[in-house]
Structure formats: structure tokens, C-alpha cells
Image (spheres, helix red, strand yellow):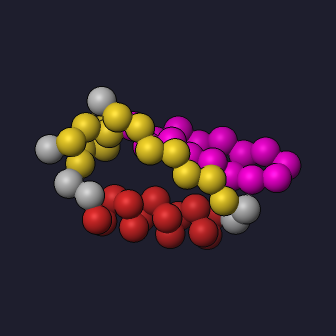
Amino acid sequence: MKVKSFYTLSSRQLDKRINVFLEDSQIDVEDIKFSATLFYIAAMVVYRDR
């Protein structure tokens, strides 16, 4: 199992980065964790290589 972390200042940019990662990767997503603070929005994709 592996993880990939993303953080940005806007949800739109976070969506774009995660979607690019998912489209360009040969992975099986196990889970996506989401967190927001005053300064940024973050997500962690938990996945397995195919």
C-alpha cells in the first residue's frame, strides 16, 4: 500500500491535481482522506499498484 499527498489553496486546483494523478496512474484506489485548514486544502490518496 502506498500514499500520495496533495495540498493546494483551492478545492478546484486540488480536484485537478488528484484527477491528473488518477488518470495517469495504473493504480487501485483504496481510500481518499480529505482535510482543510485556514490556509490550505489537503488530500491523501491511499492506493495499491496494479
Q: Is residue 20 above or below residue 34?
A: below
Q: Quadrant of the N terminus?
A: top left
Q: How many marks?
A: 0
Q: Is residue 50 left or right of residue 9?
A: left
Task: Give percent across and percent down for residue 42.
Answer: 63, 48
Task: Give percent across and percent down for residue 47.
Answer: 32, 39
Q: Quadrant of residue 45?
A: top left
Q: Is residue 16 left or right of residue 49?
A: right
Residue placed most toward the observer, 31 or 24: 24
Q: In which quarter of the image is the C terminus?
A: top left
Name of the residue lying farthest toward the left: 50
Queried whether the magenta region covers residue 37, the answer comes back as yes
Q: Which residue is drawn at 55% across and 51% down?
A: 6
Task: Give percent across and percent down for residue 31.
Answer: 40, 37
Majority secondary structure of magenta residues:
strand
Q: Is residue 26 above or below residue 4?
A: below
Query: Which stretch did the figure color magenta?
Result: 32-46
Queried whether the magenta region covers residue 20, the answer comes back as no
Name of the residue lying farthest toward the top: 1
Q: Residue at x 72, y 46 (%)?
A: 36
Q: Which residue is drawn at 82% across and 52% down?
A: 39
Q: Quadrant of residue 37?
A: top right
